[in-house]
Amino acid sequence: DQQVKQNSPSLSVQEGRISILNCDYTNSMFDYFLWYKKYPAEGPTFLISISSIKDKNEDGRFTVFLNKSAKHLSLHIVPSQPGDSAVYFCASSARDTGKLIFGQGTTLQVKP
Amino acid sequence: DAGITQSPRHKVTETGTPVTLRCHQTENHRYMYWYRQDPGHGLRLIHYSYGVKDTDKGEVSDGYSVSRSKTEDFLLTLESATSSQTSVYFCAIKPGHAYEQYFGPGTRLTVT
């Protein structure tokens, strides 16, 4: 039972355009959502997060949107840069577990 | 830099042999985690620890054991390695007040 799903294995965008990565979840107990970025041969690095009491969080070029009724979150990267090319994982957590549940990942390629 | 190291970084071993992976942190955090990353599955939790000698199972714990005798070290042991355990293994730490986890560089394990 996949509680967190990233249905697009890959995404390709042109440099300067917007990248939109999507994530769906099924567990209504999740109260915190995170995005991680991973380069080859490195560990995932924390990118941005959002609490379930908010619907938007912005940090520079990165914005995460949360739609609780649809159990959907998305990561917007504007403008996209070639250095953003990586695998992006969304993750969800319920406060009382101390654990993260990860999606399968989406590989983003930003073309110059 | 989250102050996490993993050793070894690469290992090739034969089916049936025991293998121990080490995670070391310099941050003195209470929570530590072991994940495996496989194509199409994202990161899946193997075991985690919430203090010295306090550990619990994750979603893919079969065939793995862990030990934590010191705050700074969290060991993952494959009692008898199988080819299905070929994977990239990541250790993570979590500050007690946060949701975010911070990952080590990973260990690539190949079981032949």
Image: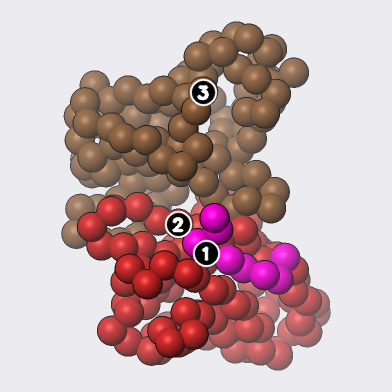
* Structural distance between the alpha carbons of marks 1 and 3: 24 Å
Residue range (magenta)? A1-9
B20 is within the stretch colored magenta: no
Q: Would you say the residues marked 2 and 1 are in contact, meaning their CB atoms lie under 8 Å apart?
A: yes
**Residue lying at 56% horizontally and 13% vertically, measured from the top left:** B80
C-alpha gap between disc 2 and disc 1? 7 Å
Residue that badge 2 annotates: A101
Q: Which chain is red?
A: A
Look at mark 1 in the image and give the residue it sits on: A4
* Label 2 vs 1, first from the N-terminus: 1
Residue B106 in view here: no
Q: Quadrant of residue A104?
A: bottom right
Per the rendering, the colour in which chain B appears is brown
Tell me the amino acid under the disc marked 2.
Ile
Instruction: Report helix, strand or loop for mark 3.
Output: loop
Q: What is the quadrant of residue A85 in the picture?
A: bottom right
